Each structure stands twice: as structure tokens, then as C-alpha cells.
Image (cartoon, rainbow, N blue to C red):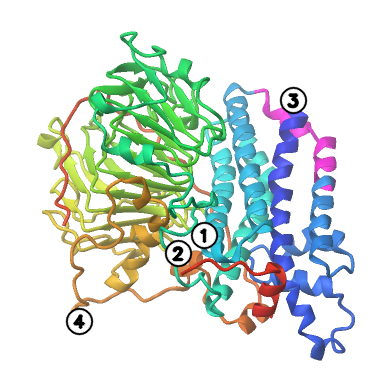
Amino acid sequence: MAGQAKKKYAIVGVASIILVAMVVAVTLGTRNSDTENSNSQSDVSSSQKAIQTICASTDYKETCINSLKSKAGNSSDPKELIEAAFKVTIDYLNEAVKNSTLLEELQADPMTKLALDNCKELAQHAIEDLERSFSKFETFDFSNLDDLLGDMKIWLSGAITYQETCLDGFEDAQGDAGEKMRNALKTSMELTSNGLAMINDVSSVLTTIDIPSFTNRRLLSEDVLGHGIDNNNIPIWVDAKRRELLQATPSTIKADLIVAKDGSGKYQTINEALNDIPQNNNQTFVLYIKEGVYEEKVIFNRTLLHLMVIGDGPTKTRITGKLNFIDGTPTYHTATVAVLGDFFIAKDIGFENAAGPEKHQAVALRVGADKAIFYNCHLDGYQDTLYAHTYRQFYRNCQISGTIDFIFGDSAAVFQNCTLVVRKPLDNQQCIVTAQGRKDVRQPTGLVLQNCSFVADPAYFPYRFQLKSYLGRPWKEFSRTIIMESFIDDLIQPDGWLAWEGTFALDTLFYAEFNNRGPSSNKMLRAQWNGVKELQASRIERFLPSKFIEGDAWLPITGIPYNPGFIYPPPVDDARLKYSSVAPEETKDLGTGRSKDEYTARPGSKTDNVGVISPSAAPSPRTSFGLPPVISPIAAPKQTPSSPLDWLLGKIW
């Protein structure tokens, strides 16, 4: 068992090498057009030059080069290089199988064993993200290139996050277990970061050379999500039933499966129903959960694709639990509901963690599903209510309540027209709405809150000036949170943002507020850290839903209410304001925007990694309630080349 777990950790690292090989296959074109310099560089094989070129864009250049050159030989053939990457994978696996000492040591302490069990699951998720990224690249369609690269970036980001989440679980373990695991994952994390850096650079080059359909996002009538389109130019994964159900009332719902506590459905519990849901489905499957309080831990696993869950209303259909950190459950597994299957939609459901005030972290909902949607849902808890863990997520007309870090994680998540309800903490606590956890500067992740309302729960309202509240704090080094066009009531402190510990991440975080309103929207007394930005509308645009989560490609077709751009007319640039200068880190997740020549010649860089702390372990109060939402007012054809790889090589090099 320990050997198998070790094998999984090794795969996380070496599977990253596959990504290196992917981009090497692209980079190999340099060798075909570089004959002028071949005499002066005769001592370096074409394969070695290709590896050096592609590794130059990474933060961990030495790891990148060493992981490939031992198996690449003198080959300059893309297929052979990819095969070499698989051979490296086998070598890593063999080495890992021979060394199981670490895992045997980590099994001794109970909390460490739980952390290790988490890592087994998280490592598998990371492996799957790397594998599907490779598969996506291997079968790419140039008319779909923009979505292809967008998918790869978010999935590689997920692989980074899963490895970091594994390490987070060891922070309360005894001894040096956490340090040992960090050392074990060091190479895999560096290689995954390198893979993301390479894909970002490829994205940048393709934008520079104006590849068809890449610089212009495809319309809804074109293929999205890789599932094809039907005769009516509608993506196959979106059937009429899904759109009709979004407008349905409880009396008109036509569900595939019904759960009802009163016995009027096929099952009385949600977990019983899970076995009847088709796996890896390409069509919408509707699970209707009738009114009732369901005390269950529910996991919608990764095989439950295109699942739509509908309730009778967020205060009527509620899923609740009490798992918490103090009673021995790692934060990751305290979630009452975990959503892991892509293309998930929840409507009119309440999610709750009702752990008591001394129970510390207690998650109501954890989301690790790509292109997940939550519409008119309530998420109630105290500390760590919503774990927006990975991938692209969209929340519309939702109410989220809590005290400490109650929206946290490393997804690319947009909250539109949502109500963020700050609840009364314990007397020794202060409240923080967000704790975004971006680990790598190239990750396309962050929290975007648009046209939301920051308000106090009635029980907290009398204490809002005594027990302080803040918009957010940086959980990880490159934490990124954007608050735009929102109502910020007087519960938020004038400085707005709270430090995590000392000066950690104050220079590297990216926080911005834009065109907000309300008593605490004034930014005159905001924290003056380097990472707190004053941005013009032109720089905020990239965080609009249509761009940040590619919302136009997958949201409107579902029928979910959705604003792709600004909801209110953006203010014109103000000459009296001192706007923040554009630092290179601001757009690293988009690609560098350099030319082809710069891409193939520039030197690599090295960045230091800073150790960070997991979300606060402070205790939190309890109960659930049904506070009504305070919603703010709402104001190219496909072309398939005959030889994609040759076409790309010819265009770039």
C-alpha cells in the first residue's frame, strides 16, 4: 500500500515531463529553420538545443533540462521525444518503488496518516490533470486552439494546487513529516510549474503571430468544451432539458431521479441515489432533491459529469453536516458536500456545515469541478464555508455566510450578484471574507466578486464595529482577489485588507477594488501594500467573466443569468488618481506577449518559493439561518488544417 502511494507521488512529478515533451514537440521547429547557425553550434544536438530552448522560459530550468536530456538522446523527432518522456516516467516509478521508507515513517502518527491519505487522493487528481492536458494537446484542433490552451492552463494550475493542498495537510502533523513530504514533492511541483510556464509562453507566441481563431474568442455557435455541436449549432453537452429545468418550478420539474425524505421519490437519501447516476455522461442528468434537511456527507465524484442538482429552494432543500478539524478531520475532508465532476450545476439548494463554535475549520461546500455553476444557492457556515478549490467556477445570485476565510481556495471563480453575509464571530476573532490561495504567479486563478453585497448578519450587526471585518487576506504568495461594482456596507474596516502574518505576500499579492459603492467602499485609508492596486477600467477588463473564466463559451448556453462584461458604465480614467504601474507579474498568467525571436532566445529566470501557512485554525460559532439575499441591482468559422503540427511549426518557426 505504501509503495503504491509512493508511486502516485512519483507519477505527479514525471507526468509533468510529458508536458515538457509536448512543448518540445512545438519547439523542435526551430531546428528546421536554424540552419544558418548549425555550424557554430555543432557540438550541441538538435534535441539538446530544443530542450534548452523550451526550458529557458521556466522558473526551474535545471530541473527541466535534467529531467529530459538523459532520455532524449540525439533525436529531434517529436514522437521520439514524447516516447522518451514516458521512459523517464518508468525510471522515476522504478526509483520510487525502491524507496518506501518515507511513507512507512509517515504512517506512524494518526494526523500524519490522515494527511498522507489526503495526499493519495490529491496526487491522483494531479495525475489526471496532467494526463488530460497531454491528451488535449495530442489531439488538438486549430479551430479550437484558444479553448485548448485555456483548458490546459486551468488543469495544470489544478495539478499545482493539488500538490500544494497535500502539503497543507501536514501542517498539524508531528515532527518533520511536512518537511519530508515537501522534499518528496519538490521535483514534481517544479516540473508542473515549468509545464505551466511553457504553455503560457506558447499561448503568448500564438497570440503574437495571429493564429486564426486564437486571437478572437469563438462564438457560442461554435464547438465548446470539446464535445462537438449538433445540427442546430448547439453544443452537444447542452440539451434543451437543462435549459428548461433552469426555468422550471418544483411542480414542473422533469427529473431523471428524485430524492425525497417523505418517501415520494425513488430514494430517501442522496447517497443512495448516487449509484443510479450514469458515470462519464455526455448528456445532462437531473437529480431533483425535494424539500427536507438531509444530514449527509455527499461526494459527487469525478465520474459524475454533466450532473444538474435541483432543490425546492435554498432554505427548503438543505444538505448539512458537522465534520470539523478539531474532531480529527482534515480541512479538506470536512466538506458536507464535495463537487468533483465537471459541468456541474446546482440550483435552489442549501449547503451547510453546522459544526460548533470551537470546532475550527468546517467546510460546507468544496468545489473541484471545472465549469461548475451554482445558481440561487445558500452556503452557510463559519470558518472556511466555501472551499473554491480548483478550476473554473461561476456563482450567481448565491448567499454565502461565514466568519473566517469563508471563501477560500485556488480556483478561477466569479461571484456575480451574490450576497456575502458576515456572521458574528467569537469575542477573540475577527472576520475575513476571502483567503485566495494562488501559489504560482502563472496560475490563471483568483476570486472575482462582481455586483455583490458585503453585509452583516443581523446577529453580528450590533457588534460590527467592535469585532472587525475585512475583505480578504493572502493565504498563498500570489493571492489574487478583485472586487468590482459591489456594495460594501460599513462593517468592513477602512484599511480593507488584512495581513496573513508579518509581511508575507504583501508585495506579491494582487488585490484590486473597482467602481464599488457603499459606506466602506472609500479607498482613501486602504492598506498601502505594493500588492494592493489602483487599476483603470482597461486593466480590470481581463477579470470580467467573459475573459477571466471564458464565460461566453459555456455560460449563456445553459440559460443561467449571466453578465459577460461590466454591469454598470465604468468610470473614465481619473487624472487625479495615481494608477499602479504594470508589473511583469500582473500578466504572467496570460503569457509574456513577446515575439517569436524573444521566445526562442531569452534567458530563463529563477524565483524563490516562500513557505506559507494554511487557513487560520481559530474557532468559530454555529447555527444556520435563512436570511433573504440582498442582491444589488443589475443594470469565426472552424478551419481544420490537414497537418496541424506541420502547420504550427511553419507558422511559428
Q: Quadrant of residue 303?
A: top right
Residue topped by disc 3:
1
Q: In 3D space, how far apart are the residues under numbered discs 1 and 2 (Cα atoms)?
A: 9 Å
Q: Residue at x 28, y 31 (%)?
A: 348
What amino acid is found at the position of numbered circle 4 in the picture? Ala
Residue topped by disc 4:
575
- Does the residue at mark 4 contact the one at mark 3 (Cβ under 8 Å)? no
- Does the residue at mark 3 contact the one at mark 1 (Cβ under 8 Å)? no
- The quarter in which the N terminus is drawn is top right
Q: In 3D space, how far apart are the residues under numbered discs 1 and 4 (Cα atoms)?
A: 37 Å
Q: Earlier in the sequence, mark 3 or mark 1?
A: 3
What amino acid is found at the position of numbered circle 1 in the picture? Asp
- The part of the chain drawn in magenta is 91-108
What amino acid is found at the position of numbered circle 2 in the picture? Arg
Q: Is residue 561 magenta?
A: no
Residue 147 - label? 1
Q: Residue at x 79, y 65 (%)?
A: 78
Q: Position of residue 355 (x, y in %)?
A: 34, 21
- Does the residue at mark 1 contact the one at mark 4 (Cβ under 8 Å)? no
Q: Is residue 94 magenta?
A: yes
Q: Of 296 and 213, which appears nearest the observer?
A: 213
